Amino acid sequence: MSFKVFILDFDGVITSLNINWDEVKRKASKIAGFDIPSLTKFFENNFSTKLFWKVSKLVEKYEIMAVKIAKPYPDVKTSLEILSRSGKVIFLATMQATCPVTFFLEKHGLMNYFYEILTRDMFGSKRKQLNYILNKVDIPPRTIVLIDDSRYNYKICRKLKLACILLKQRNNYTLYKVITDLLT
């Protein structure tokens, strides 16, 4: 299969933010006044409400602290260069906020590889991000691949009939390995 569009997740694919998500969920739950077991589902169900923005600002503070010390996985720049030289369209679709993501990409010279960057504050859910991309590129879903580290996002991807790769960066299973396998 010849993929034309590659959609990459940020935390877990481009870098590891090493955020204590349990602590963030506890603080978010306190702000909300109810238990938030999943930030992903919370943002999805509350997009653009006052509560969404309050919780998102809290999470963004953690993300900003994390991106200041985070580094891209060692194979990321090479992987993006390969995709770019191959003429592939690359989107970044992440449930992180715009400010920390753009800071990180600019700091590490990765911003220009992406055709478009889709963030939490723009869409509120991976499903909305993927639907946006499907409408924007207007090509068959089977020619689009999502590379993500979340099983939840993988299931959304499958429902939309996109090609989906569940990437857990470890050992020899890296973004570079996935990209080179998909292009050969």
Image (cartoon, rainbow, N blue to C red):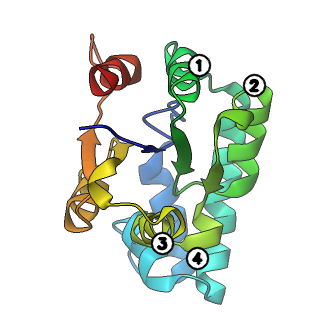
Label 2 SS: loop
Tag 3 residue: 135
Nearer-the-camera pick, 143 or 108: 143
**For the point 70% across and 40% down, which residue is it?**
65
Q: Is residue 131 above or below residue 80?
A: below
Residue 140 is at least partly visible in this image: yes
**For the point 66% across and 76% down, which residue is it?**
54
Label 3 SS: helix
Name the disc covering residue 31, or none. Answer: 4
| Structural distance between the alpha carbons of marks 3 and 1 | 28 Å
Label 4 SS: helix
Name the disc covering residue 77, or none. Answer: 1
| Structural distance between the alpha carbons of marks 4 and 2 | 35 Å
**For the point 50% across and 61% down, which residue is it?**
137
**For the point 49% across and 40% down, which residue is it?**
11
Q: Amino acid at mark 2?
A: Gly
| Structural distance between the alpha carbons of marks 2 and 1 | 9 Å
| Structural distance between the alpha carbons of marks 3 and 2 | 28 Å
Give the left or right position of residue 89, taking residue 143 as reference: right
- Residue 105, image x, y percentages: 71, 35
- Residue 3, image x, y percentages: 35, 41
| Structural distance between the alpha carbons of marks 4 and 1 | 38 Å
Q: Nearer the viewer, mark 3 or mark 1?
A: 3
Residues at circles 2 and 1 in contact by the CB criterion of under 8 Å: yes
Marked residue nearer the N-terminal end (4 or 1): 4
Nearer-the-camera pick, 136 or 73: 136
Tag 2 residue: 109
Nearer-the-camera pick, 50 or 178: 178
Q: How many marks?
A: 4
